[in-house]
Image (tube, helix red, strand yellow):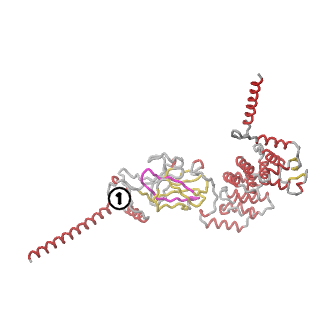
Amino acid sequence: MLGPNLKTTKVSDYHLFHTMSNSHPLRPFTAVGEIDHVHILSEHIGALLIGEEYGDVTFVVEKKRFPAHRVILAARCQYFRALLYGGMRESQPEAEIPLQDTTAEAFTMLLKYIYTGRATLTDEKEEVLLDFLSLAHKYGFPELEDSTSEYLCTILNIQNVCMTFDVASLYSLPKLTCMCCMFMDRNAQEVLSSEGFLSLSKTALLNIVLRDSFAAPEKDIFLALLNWCKHNAKENHAEIMQAVRLPLMSLTELLNVVRPSGLLSPDAILDAIKVRSESRDMDLNYRGMLIPEENIATMKYGAQVVKGELKSALLDGDTQNYDLDHGFSRHPIDDDCRSGIEIKLGQPSIINHIRLLLWDRDSRSYSYFIEVSMDELDWIRVIDHSHYLCRSWQKLYFPARVCRLLSEDPILLHFQPPVSVLTGRRRTSVREQHLYQQHQNHSVHAILLPFFPHGPQLMASLVGPAFNMLEQLPHTTATSLIHATLSQIIAMVSYLSVFLLLILYSFGLLLISEIFCGFLKIVV
C-alpha cells in the first residue's frame, strides 16, 4: 500500500512545483531538459539589498545610508568596478562613499535594478525619473537608459517636457530629444507660457527657439525670452535675443513691444524694418508646423479648398471611388492660368513632398505647375511640369518650404482620341490660333484634341488627399486644332498625288521615246 501512495505523492509534488515555476511572471519558456531559475537567483540576490548582512561598502545619499556589496556592484557595473577595486580611497574595507549628484529615491531605484534587474517607473515623479535617467547614463547602463527614455516619451506633458528636453540634450539621447521637440512644436504657445520654460538651460533654450518648426507667433517668442532673461539675470541676454526673428513682427509690435524692453538696440529694430519692407514675403525666414510623414492637406489639420469646383471632394482622402460626376475637385482652364485649385492649410507648415492624383480614367495627360505662398500675393513655384506630359499619381519632391497656401494650375491638356471622335469642322478663331501657336511653343508635337457635340467635356482631375482638379477647354479650341490637323493631312495627300502624276508623266515620255526610236529603225 505504501508504494502506490509514495508514487502518487511524488507526481503531485512535481506537478505543484512545475506549475509554480511556470506561473512566475519572469520565467521564460525553456526546452525540455533545460533548467532556468534566473528568477530565483534574482530574488535571492535582491534579498541581500533589504538587510545589511555581508555588506562591505556604504553609500551616503542625502544623509541616508545604503549598505551594499562590492562584488555585486563590480560585476554589474564597470564604473563601480573601477571605483571599488581601483586602489583608491573607496577601495578600503568598510568604506563610506558620499554621493552628491543624485537623490535618495533615484539611488534606491538604481540599487534595486543592479541587484534584481527590475525597476518600477509608473509610480515615480518626473523629477525622480530624470535623476534615475541621469544615474543610468553616468554609471553606464545603456539598456536601462533606453528603457527609461522610452517610458518618458509616453508621459510628456506641458509641465515636464522642458526639463525632460534639457536632460535629453545634456546626455545626447536622440530618441527622447526628438520626441520632446515634436511635442513642443505641436504645443509651442503653451510651452512658452509654462514654468518649465523658465528653468531651461541657455543651450536647450536656443536649441528650441532657433528651430524653424517651433511655430509660435514671433511676439509670443519675444515675450517668453524676455521673461527667461529676467529669471536668469546672469546669462548673456544679447545672445538670447538674437534668436528672435524681428522681420516677422509687425511695425506696431516692433515699436510698442520690442523697443520698450531695452534689450535690442534701435539699429537692430531699424534693420528689421528695412528687411521687412525690401524683401519678398516668401524670402522671409518664416516658422512653420512640421508633422513628419502625415498628410496635412486634410480637414483634420484645418485645411480647406478656397478655389475650385466640388471643393468637398478634395480633402476626403478617398483615392479609389471617383468618376466624371463625383469624387474629385476641378476647375476650368483659362488663358491666364490663374483659375486653378487653391488650398489653404490650417496653419503655416513646412512641406517638401506632395502626392497628387491626376485624372487617369482615360488616355488624357496634363501639364501643370504648383506654387506656394504665405499671403496669397507673393507666390513661389516649387514644381514646374509645364513641359511634361503627366498622368495618374505624381510624387513630387522639392526643397522644404514654409507655406500657408498651395495653388495648382494647369497650362495644357493633351488627349489622343479615337478616330470616331474627330467630327465637326468650322473656321478657326483668332483665340484658337493663338492657343495652337502656344502649344507649338511648348514643344508639344502631334496634338489631337477631341470635339464633343454635346458641349465642353474635357476634364483634367486631381483626386486624393493632396489635390483634385477638373479642367475644361472651349468647344472652339478642340475644333480648330482638329481642323488644322486634317488640313495638314489633306496637304500631304495632295503632295503625294502630284508626285505620283510626275512619275507617271515621266514614264509616259520614256515609253513614247522608245516607240519613236523603234519606228525610225523600221524606216531606215
Q: Left or right: where does residue 384 sit relative to residue 22?
A: left
Amino acid type, callout 1? Ile
Identify the image quadrant of residue 83.
bottom right
Locate residue 307, reporting x and y percent. 51, 53
Quadrant housing the C terminus: bottom left
- Label 1: few (<14), some (14–19) or many (≥20) C-alpha neighbours in 10 Å: many
Q: Which residue is mark 1?
A: 482
Residue at 13% over, 73% down: 518
Q: Left or right: where does residue 466 sit relative to residue 247?
A: left
Most common secondary structure along the magenta stretch: strand
Residue at 77% over, 59% down: 229
Residue at 11% over, 74% down: 519
Q: Which residue is most to the left?
A: 523
Element class at badge 1: helix
In magenta, the rendered stretch is 353-376
Magenta region includes residue 258: no
Q: Which residue is most to the top?
A: 1
Locate residue 303, reporting x and y percent. 57, 51
